Amino acid sequence: MPNLSQILKAEISRIARKETKSLVNPVRASNYTLKKAVAELKRKVTVLESENKRLSAFYKNTRDQAEVKPEDIQNARITVRTVRALRKKLGFSQTAFGKLLGISGQSVLIMEKKTGRLKLRSSTLASMLSIRGIGKREAKKRLEEIAKGK
């Protein structure tokens, strides 16, 4: 016959585990939902940070475009080869490159057909100088922003 103290001890342990489990289960469930919510918020923060970074870079670049100095515009030497090389470097068609500069694709075609130094309007020259130092990704983002703006 088992010892009575062992039976009581086992029963007390079983009841204590049952009570503890009934008290912990709601906390465990709320902990699960909170962890899920935190993970979702982290994803949203990551997306928002990347969007913020992209937008701040875009506005910084548009500000840089406005900050092209007048003496830089006067001293700039833009040739047919410069236009063609810049367009090819960015990987754009003449139409897309024209949209990026704020002119028509036909104007880009004419610029590329001429010879020697080009005489461009100051606004076109300023936008040409502002995109001179950017890469393909940034150029595509700018073009998308222009398309969204219209």
Image (tube, rainbow, N blue to C red):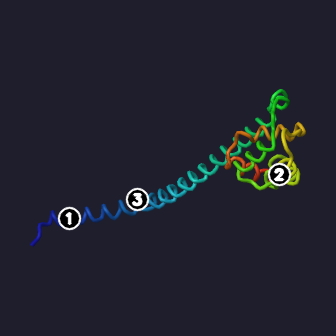
Which residue appears farthest toward the front when viewing the image? 115
Q: Amino acid at mark 1?
A: Leu
Which residue appears farthest toward the left when viewing the image? 1
**Label drawn at residue 8:** 1
In primary-sequence order, the first of circles 1 and 2 is 1
Q: Are marks 1 and 3 in contact (CB under 8 Å)?
A: no
User: Could you tell me which secondary element the residue under label 2 belongs to?
Assistant: helix
Residue at the spot 84% in from the left edge and 40% down from the top edge: 116
Q: CA distance from mark 1 to mark 3?
A: 24 Å
Q: Where in the figure is residue 100, as x and y percent of width and height?
A: 80, 49
Q: Amino acid at mark 3?
A: Val
**Label drawn at residue 49:** none
- Circle 3 residue: 24
- Circle 2 residue: 99
Judged by depth in the image, the label closer to the viewer, 3 or 2, is: 2
Q: Where in the figure is residue 138, as x and y percent of width and height?
A: 69, 47
Q: Where in the figure is residue 89, as x and y percent of width and height?
A: 69, 48
